[in-house]
């Protein structure tokens, strides 16, 4: 009976037109929203060639030369014990000074410029949202662009940390300089968490992107949302998919650029 429908569904054009309808729906959700918050994870930066920590071929699956898992190397205990080893791993695997913002970053910066997007809450430490022009960025895991002296607190740039091999030392007091990132074994910044909760609880549209929502605290933040719509854009399923008004399983840059940057 439904011969024509089943035939059509096998054609690429049909699937494409379905996608277009979904993109149009997302565009309308964005258009009617006044207070959008974006909650993002590593997947927002993979399109900038920064590896996803937790994906199959990500950083955590790499066998490290120190014979301990990366979670251990990126812990405060390892940093204190083997600071030089930490820095050699850090420079080689975590810092991508040449990475450029991708479509996700650009689209979100555009939404902030239009006055619609009020905050970006990110687990990423790469600073690419700011590089794309976003200003309301809550970096709950810190930023590799900031470092500070453990003793006197003097601030240092990433360039300072990368300028020499070995352990970077403070030019005032010769103490160890550490990155302003949350290492394993360290608590999160309470003020940033509180601000994230406030932003999410005030939002009318929450876009969650590039995170499988399994890692604390991002997974927990979503339950503070009391607004109208949640949109989840991720390459794999998440445990919160049932809460979503819309769900895209695909590259986030493509979805957001089509919904925000193009008028088709
Ligand atoms: Zn110092």
Image (spheres, grey):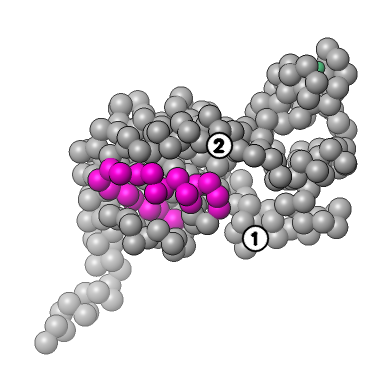
Q: Position of residue 199 (x, y in %)?
A: 39, 34
Q: Nearer the viewer, residue 63 or 213?
A: 213
Q: Is residue 11 above or below residue 132?
A: below
Ligand 1's quadrant is top right
Which residue shows up at 24% across the image and 61% down it?
17
Q: Position of residue 213 (x, y in %)?
A: 49, 54
* Residue sticking out furthest to the bottom: 1
Q: Which mark is residue 140?
A: 2
Determine whether, in the image, residue 32 is placed left or right of residue 226.
left
Which residue shows up at 35% across the image and 44% down it?
225
Residue 261 visible to an observer of this rendering: no
* Residue sticking out furthest to the left: 1
Q: Quadrant of residue 128?
A: top right
Q: Select label 2 or label 1 by which is in front.
A: 2
Q: Position of residue 80 (x, y in %)?
A: 84, 38
Q: Which residue, given by chain and number where applicable, does mark 1 sit on? A: 57
| Quadrant position of the N terminus in the picture | bottom left
Q: Position of residue 111 (x, y in %)?
A: 34, 32
Task: Count the numbered circles shown.
Answer: 2
Say if the magenta span includes residue 233. yes
Q: Earlier in the sequence, mark 2 or mark 1?
A: 1
Residue 223 visible to an observer of this rendering: yes
Determine whether, in the image, residue 77 is placed left or right of residue 197.
right
Q: Quadrant of residue 178?
A: top right
Provide the secondary structure element on which disc 2 rests: loop
Which residue shows up at 30% across the image and 26% down it?
115
Q: Is residue 226 above or below residue 134?
A: below
Tell me the magenta residue range.
215-234
Local crowd size for mark 2, using a 10 Å CA cut-off: few (<14), some (14–19), many (≥20): many
CA distance for labels 2 and 1: 24 Å
Q: Nearer the viewer, residue 125 or 91?
A: 125
| Quadrant position of the C terminus in the picture | top left
């Amino acid at each position: 009976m439904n011969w024509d429908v089943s035939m059509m569904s096998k054609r690429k054009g049909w699937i494409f037109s379905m996608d277009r309808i979904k993109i149009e729906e997302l565009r309308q959700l964005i258009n009617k929203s006044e207070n959008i918050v974006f909650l993002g994870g590593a997947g927002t930066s993979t399109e900038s060639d920064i590896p996803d920590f937790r994906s199959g071929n990500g950083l955590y699956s790499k066998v490290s030369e120190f014979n301990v898992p990366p979670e251990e190397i990126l812990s405060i205990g390892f940093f204190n014990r083997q600071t030089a080893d930490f820095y050699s791993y850090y420079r080689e695997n975590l810092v991508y000074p040449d990475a450029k913002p991708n479509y996700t970053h650009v689209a979100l910066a555009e939404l902030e410029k239009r006055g619609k997007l009020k905050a970006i809450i990110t687990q990423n430490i790469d600073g690419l949202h700011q590089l794309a022009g976003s200003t309301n960025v809550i970096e709950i895991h810190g930023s590799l662009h900031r470092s500070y002296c453990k003793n006197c607190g003097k601030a240092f740039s990433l360039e300072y940390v990368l300028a020499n091999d070995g352990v970077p030392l403070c030019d005032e007091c010769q103490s160890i300089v550490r990155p302003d990132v949350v290492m394993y074994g360290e608590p999160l910044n309470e003020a940033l968490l509180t601000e994230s909760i406030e932003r999410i609880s005030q939002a009318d549209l929450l876009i969650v992107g590039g995170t499988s929502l399994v890692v604390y605290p991002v997974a927990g933040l979503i339950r503070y949302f009391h607004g109208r719509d949640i949109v989840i854009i991720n390459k794999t399923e998440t445990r919160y998919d049932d809460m979503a008004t819309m769900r895209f399983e695909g590259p986030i840059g493509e979805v957001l650029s089509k919904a925000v940057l193009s008028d088709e």
